[in-house]
Amino acid sequence: MAERDPRRQAASPPSAAPPPTAAEVATELDAAESAPSERTPQGQASLIVRAGDGAARVIDLTDGDVVAVGRAPESTVCVDDARVSRNHARVARRGQAVALVDLGSRNGTSVNGAVVRGAERALAGGDVIRIGPAEIVVAIAAPAPVEAAPPGAAPEALEGPPSGAGAGFVVADEAMVKVFQVVQRLARAQTTVLVLGETGAGKEVVSEQLHRISPRAGGPFVRLSCAALPEALLESELFGHEKAAFTGADRRKIGYFEAAQGGTLLLDEIGELPLAMQAKLLRVLESRRVARIGGTQEIELDVRVVCATHRDLQAEVAAGRFRQDLYYRISTFVLRVPPLRERRAEIALLAHRFAQQVAGRMGERAPRFAPAAMQALEAHAWPGNLRELRNAVEHAVVLAEGGVIEVEHLPASVVEGAEGAAPPASAGAGAPPASAGAPPPSVDGGTMPARLAELEKRSIEDALAAEGNNQTRAAKRLGISRRALLYKLDKYDIRR
């Protein structure tokens, strides 16, 4: 008699574990809460400083650094205000600890609304220091997440140390302080977590932080984007296959579940999973066992599964596109990641980090942001969240000359979105004049960024024409680098 394929069982085996009840989840979380915890993660510490002009600048803190605040001109943060003492306070980092010391100032130092006078106060990410008109936000960024491997890559490629390509888990805004506190409790429990948030909001970063501070931190963190693979490959990638299981299977392949043994498996964009695969995934989650395609032996799993999606899964269930039983299985605890527009205190720090990364890849020193440029970034709504911010900063770093990012270096979509809060620089500031005889740019209708873009495009075309299409000489004529010129040629679709 042929051996029965365990993957075709109609019902879950007797050993299948039912979803935890609300009482069991509460007990797990209560036990986790009783364990020692921190308010924010450990990692790179920074200060986001806003002085009288309201524009933010970022000061990174490494071990042993001391930032002096006061009216004295030699202060790291000089605040020229009568309410501020000459040597008012200092912020220092010793190891992983960051602390504020009030230096006996006349009016004291406010930390989260409480006044500190002549004393020391430990600081954490999200703390807000106020000294006269100056506001200083403490930010902590945990290590950046592992980069995702391209579709079809072996699951093992997703293991290993963080790549540093992203900004990591940043805690500077009160909204993310609350998220981190919940993540700490969830990390110590074994509760299944569904992470919700808009595309690009940082769901993967939160999921990896959940893994990194959990008892499974020594195991692998493996991510699979359910939207990145065609339906025909999903089952093989998730569960693996035996040699000769199907045409082209010339060797045994372990799936993502097996690759994550002893660690955490993130099923990203689970809302994109086809219905047929949802049924198979549900059975694996309930039985905690998996069988490779073409095999008959079931493999016991020791994997924590975290799911993430930007979709409203309850609406998907109502529409018949997502199984209700699978939704109940994966949504034991739902964690929402707020979009970037609800975490505005982080924008300056994230922009600073992205600028460092882009400049580092180019082998250059990271430029600083002019106050107007930073105000434009902080005023934008960021519908694309972290991805949009990263792209905007890369755009600006490529165009910036002289080590300063100005408003005109930002993408037009960002400037237009922030036009009411941060007016762009005038056309005469930094834009080369059009050559004699060229028709003047239209000033009737259109936004200021659109008019500036038209003026810039015409100036580039005139410079190329004047230099016989020699890009090096045209760039010199315009007062920009050749690299920046090439970028603008692509931006304005100017024929090279």
Image (spheres, rainbow, N blue to C red):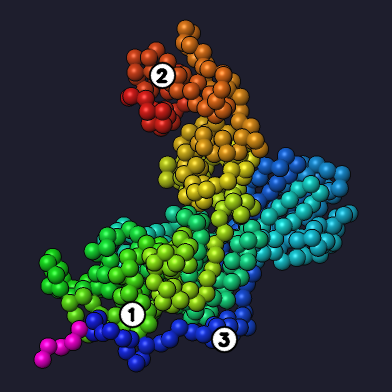
Dominant SS type (magenta): loop
Where 391 falls versus 173 (above or below)? above
Is residue 412 or residue 261 the one in the foreground? 412
Q: Which residues are magenta?
A: 1-5
For marks 2 and 3, give the CA distance: 69 Å
Closer to the observer: label 2 or label 3? 3
Does the magenta portion include 360? no
Secondary structure beneath disc 1?
Answer: helix
Q: Position of residue 34 (x, y in %)?
A: 63, 83
Please tell me which residue is depicted at 38% across the width and 14% down the height of the picture.
465
Distance (Cα) linking label 1 and label 3: 24 Å
Q: Residue at x 51, y 34 (%)?
A: 412
Q: Residue at x 71, y 66 (%)?
A: 122
- Disc 2 on helix, strand or loop? helix
Expressed as whole percent of the image width and height from the top left, the position of residue 64 reads: 64, 59
Please state if 135 lies on the left or on the right of 217 as rendered: right
Of residues 440 and 169, the one drawn nearer to the viewer in this rendering: 440
Vertical order, 393 against 9 (above or below):
above
Judging by the rendered image, the residue that carries numbered circle 1 is 283
- Mark 2 residue type: Glu
Q: From the viewer's perspective, is 246 left or right of 415?
A: left
Q: Which mark is residue 23?
A: 3
Image quarter of residue 295: bottom left
Q: x%, y% of residue 278?
A: 34, 71
Amino acid at the residue labelled 1: Arg
Residue position for label 2? 461
